[in-house]
Amino acid sequence: MSITALENFLSSLSSKPILHVNGSNHQGAVLTVDFGEKSSEINTNVIMELSDLMRNATLNMVKRANNVKINHDSSHGIFWSSAF
């Protein structure tokens, strides 16, 4: 799974969140997705799909990572992946 799948998913959302690719040099936030504000579009299904896609894209970018954690600040609509 590549970052393309994540980009395609994000482009299908009406709120058009922004994807920031920080890369493997910034393992505390390899990928960041910013919805800009708390969006009504952020529901359980979107969170699950977004988390899976972010996890897979992060593992693809940071080959040496054993674990990827997806964090979010729901009050600001920001999600980020961390690699360990």
Image: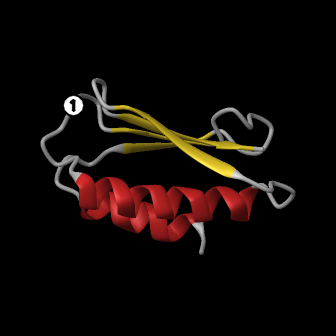
**Taking 28 as reference, is 2 above or below it?**
below
**Residue at 63%, 35% in the rendered image:** 29
Q: Residue furthest top?
A: 75
Residue with the mark numbered 1 = 38
Left or right, residue 53 beside residue 67: left
**Residue at 21%, 31% in the rendered image:** 38
**Taking 58 as reference, is 81 above or below it?**
above
Query: Residue 77: percent from the left, percent from the top?
Result: 31, 33
Query: Residue 31: percent from the left, percent from the top?
Result: 58, 44
Q: Amino acid at mark 1?
A: Lys
* Image-quadrant location for residue 1: bottom right
Left or right, residue 11 beside residue 5: left
**Residue at 31%, 60% in the rendered image:** 11
Secondary structure beneath dot 1 equals loop
Q: Residue furthest left?
A: 40
**Taking 15 as reference, is 58 above or below it?**
below
Query: Residue 5: percent from the left, percent from the top?
Result: 47, 71
Query: Residue 74: percent from the left, percent from the top?
Result: 31, 31
